[in-house]
Amino acid sequence: MTTVSDPLLIDTDVLVDYLRGRSEAVNYLDNLSAPLFLSVITVAELYAGVRNGQERKQLDSFINAFGIIPLDDTIAITGGLYRRDYGKSHGTGLADALIAATAMTRQLTLVTLNKKHFPMVKTIVVPY
């Protein structure tokens, strides 16, 4: 069971909903008081879909509100093993495997809309 103050790793899908103004995502994220983190993988996924100009400036500002967790050798090895072990059975791609490894190695609760891709994560929240 997570508490209000447990640090959270926010998955890309929740952030995309927030940036698109989906009310459930906005209400959820705006009312969190816990420390919030992103994997560098999530940062890359967000920038892969951003348009230059105002949208890019807004994303730059938005990203700065989170702690960013870089990949290291432990996350890379763990993520590779997760991809190997769960890729076929759960559809876990390399990006999701690395996000899962970040959550597990840093002992963060993962907030995602796609629980199926993260069977290896012990503490997970599907927020809406």
Image: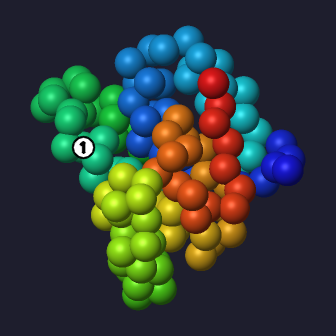
The answer to whether residue 78 is above or below residue 68 is below
Residue 101 vertical placement versus 77 (above, below): above
> Which secondary structure, mark 1?
helix
The amino acid type, in three-letter code, at marker 1 is Tyr
Q: Residue at x 41, y 84 (%)?
A: 77
Q: Is residue 70 left or right of residue 32?
A: left
The foreground one among 107 and 122 is 122
Q: Position of residue 126 (x, y in %)?
A: 63, 36
In the foreground, 98 or 67: 98
In the image, residue 60 lies at what x, y percent? 33, 41
- Based on the displayed image, in which of its 4 quarters is residue 19 positioned? top left
Judge whether residue 17 can be spotted in this image: yes
Query: Neighbour class for label 1 at 10 Å: few (<14), some, many (≥20)?
Result: some
Q: Residue at x 71, y 56 (%)?
A: 123
Image location of residue 89, percent across then percent down: 41, 59
Q: Is residue 41 visible?
A: no
Residue 122, x across and y down, in percent: 69, 62
The residue to which callout 1 is attached is 47
Which residue sits at x=44%, y=24%? 17
| Quarter occupied by residue 72 | bottom left
Pick out the residue farthest to the front.
89
Q: What residue is shown at x 47% (from left), y 25% (from top)?
A: 18
